[in-house]
Image (cartoon, rainbow, N blue to C red):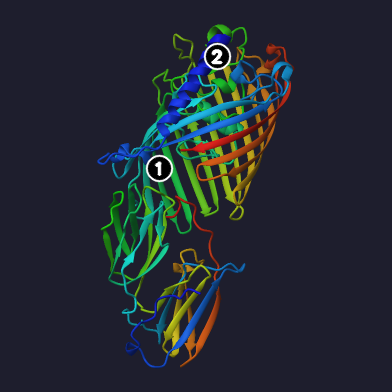
Amino acid sequence: MEIVRASKRRAFDLASAGLLGLCLPAAAPAGTPAWLAPDTVSGTIDLRLAGADGEPSWTDDGFGKARFGGGDGGGFSPRPVLAEAELVWRPPLGWDLTGTLAVAAQHEQDYPVDLIEAFVTWRPVPRGKTRLSARAGLMWPSVSLEHEGPAWAVTDMITPSAINSWIGEEVKPVAVEGTVSRALGSQRVSATLAVFGFNDTAGTLLSFRGWAMHDLKAGAFGLQKLPPLNNFMLFAQAAETRPTIEIDDRPGFYGKLAWSPAAPVQLEAFYYANRGVPEAVTPSLQWGWDTRFLHLGLRADLGPRTRLLAQALSGTTEMGIEEGAHYWVETRYRAAYLRATHEAGRVALSGRFDLFDSRERGSEMEREESEEGWALTGAGRLRLSDEAALLVEALHIDSRRGTRLRAGAAPRQSQSVVQLALRLTL
Amino acid sequence: MRVGLAFLVAASAWPALAAELTVELRTPSGQSVPNAVVSLYPGGGPAPLAPLRGPFQIAQRNTQFQPFVLIVPVGGQVAFPNYDSFRHHVYSFSPAKRFELKLYAREQDRTVRFDKAGAVPLGCNIHDQMTAFVKVTDTGLAARSDAAGRIFFANVPPGPVVARVWHPWLRLPGNQAELRWTMPARGSQRHALTLKLRPPPRPGAAY
C-alpha cells in the first residue's frame, strides 16, 4: 500500500512540474490562431504548509473531515505539500463562443493529472436589457459563492464551507444549461435551467463519510476514497466512488433563480434533482443515487470593502433496493454557513461559521451513520502581486459521527487544521 | 488644477463679456467625484459645438476602457483602438446608439459615429469588468470633472444658465440633475455640489 502511494505521489509531482512547464510564457509565432494564443492559457500553483491534529483525514482512509489529519497519535505535524497545479485553457471559438478546459494535479487525487472541467460557453452581445447565455459540458453548476475564476479557486480563503466542499467533490455533472438575465431598473433577475447526466453517484460521500471541509475538486476519471463501510455495504458498494458516471441513462435537471434588488445584494435559490435510480448498479458496484436538494444563497456588500456570504442547503439521497419503507441508504442532509470578509488594501480577513448535520434512515445503514457538527474558520489573504498571494488559515471542526467507532475512535471528534498557502497565477 | 477643456480657443466667436465658472463635485461623505459631466445651456439653449474638437477615442488597454467617460459632440466620430494583445468585443445597446465592434488584437482603425445626444454605456462582451460611457453632447460648454472632482469653464456668457450634471452612478432619474444659475458679466463664480451616488455595479452586472 505504501509503495503504491509513494509512486502515485511521485507521479503527481512530475505531472505538476509538467503542467508548470506548459504555463511558462512563450512568444506566439506570427500567424498563431487566436485559440492557440498564449493569453488563452493560465495556470495556478498552490504550495502549502499544512498541519493538523486529530484523526486521519478521509483522504487517508479515515473519518476526518479535513483534507489533512494528525500525525501518529494525532499529533500536530506541519508538512510542506504541493497541493495543486492547475492549467486552464480558454480558447475563443468564435465571437460568441468560448471554450474552457481545466486539468489539474491535486495532491490526494487518484490520477496524477485529471480533467476538472470541459465546457463551451455561448454568450452573444445583449440586444436590449435581456441577456441570454448558455453553457454545455462537464462543469459545476453555479452554486458556490466562495469560488471564482476559470480555475474555480476559493476566494480569500483556503478551505471552502461544508456546502461548497461537497459541491466541489460530488456535484459536477455533464450538463446543457441556459440562462436568461434581465435588468429591471437598478434590479437584476436571472433564471437558469439545465438538463444533465453523469452525476448519478452524487450523495455517496455525503452518506458514507458525511460532510467534510476541504478544497479537493472532483476529477472526471479518478476515484475518491470512502471510509470503512458497514458489514453489509462492504459487499454491496465499491470501496471508492466515481463522481462522474452515468448509470441509469436518466437525465437530471437543476434550476436557479437569482435576484439582485440593489447592486450590493444578491439572493439566489437553486434546486437540483439528478433523478437517479437507486436500484441501478454497475458491475464495479457504483450505485445510482436519487439525490435532490434545495439551496439558498445570499451575497451582501456592507460597504465597499466588506462582504457577507451565506448559503444554506437541505436535501435527501437514496440508494439501493427498497426494503419495506426504506431504501438501503436514505440520508437527509443539511448545512449552512455565514461568512464575512473585510478588505483593507492588500489584505483580506475572513471569518466563517459552518453548521452541518445528516440523518440516516436507510434499511441497511445504522443510526450511527447520522452526524452533526460545526466548524469555525479564520483566514487572511495577502496579495503580493498580480500573480501571487499568500494565505493563512485556521480551521476548527467539531463533529459527532457514530461510525467513527469502526475506526476505534470516539464518535465525537474535534480537529484543528492550520495552513499557509502560496498561490501563484501564471 | 486640471482644466476642463470645453471652452473655446478663438475669442472672436464669443461675446466679449464672459465669466469663469468652477464647479466642485463631492459625495455626501466628502469624497471628490471624478468623471461627472457638467453641460451648460446659456439662456436655456445649447452653446455652439465648435470648441469640442477631436480626435476622440476610447482605447482598450490592460483590459480596461480609457477613458471611463468621454465627451463627444453630436455627429462626432470616436475611434476604438485596441492596444491589448487579445480580442475585445465592444458593444452598446442603449437607445442613443446601438452598435457592436469585433476588435482583433491590436486592431486600431475602427470608428463609430455618434449621432444622437445622450449617454451611451459601453461594455465588452468578453471582459465583463470593462465599462465606459460616451456622453454625446449637444452643447459646446460640456466638461468632465477631474480626479479632484473639479471642472473649470473659462468663458461662460452672462445671464441665466441651465446646468445639467450627469454621472453614470448618480441617484436620480436619467442619472442627471438640472440646476439653474445666473452668471455674472465678468469675474468668476464657484459652485460646490453634493452628489449622491449609487455603489458602482459589480463586474458582469453593468447592464
For mark 2, name the chain: A
Residue at label 1?
Answer: A179
Q: Amino acid at mark 1?
A: Thr
The front one of A198 and A94 is A94
As drawn, A406 above or below B67: above
Image quadrant assignment for residue B28: bottom right
In front here: A22 or B71? A22
| Callout count | 2
Nearest to N terminus: mark 2 or mark 1: 2
Residue A11 lies, in percent from the top left, at: 48, 18
Tell us which disc is closer to us: 2 or 1: 2
Q: Using the rendered image of the protein, determine whether residue A77 is visible from the camera's viewpoint.
A: yes
- Characterize the local packing of mark 1: few (<14), some (14-19) or many (20 or more) Cα atoms within 10 angstroms: some
Report which quarter residue B153 is drawn in. Answer: bottom left
Q: Amino acid at mark 2?
A: Ala
Relative to A416, is B159 on the left or the right? left
Say what secondary structure mark 2 lies in.
helix
Residue B4: x and y, percent? 44, 75
Question: Residue at left 28%, top 53%?
Answer: B107
Q: CA distance from mark 2 to mark 1?
A: 45 Å
SS under mark 1: strand
Q: Residue B138, how many percent across, how many down?
A: 34, 76
Residue behind mark 2: A6
Residue A82 coordinates in the image, percent (x, y): 55, 27
Quadrant in which residue B95 is drawn: bottom left
Residue A285 against residue A393 in the figure, above or below: above
The answer to whether one can see residue A241 in this image is: no
Near mark 2 (Cα within 10 A), the count class, few <14, some 14-19 or many ≥20, is few
**Residues at discs 2 and 1 both on one chain:** yes
Residue at 42%, 85% in the rendered image = B155
The subunit carrying tag 1 is: A
For the N terminus of chain A, the image quarter is: top right
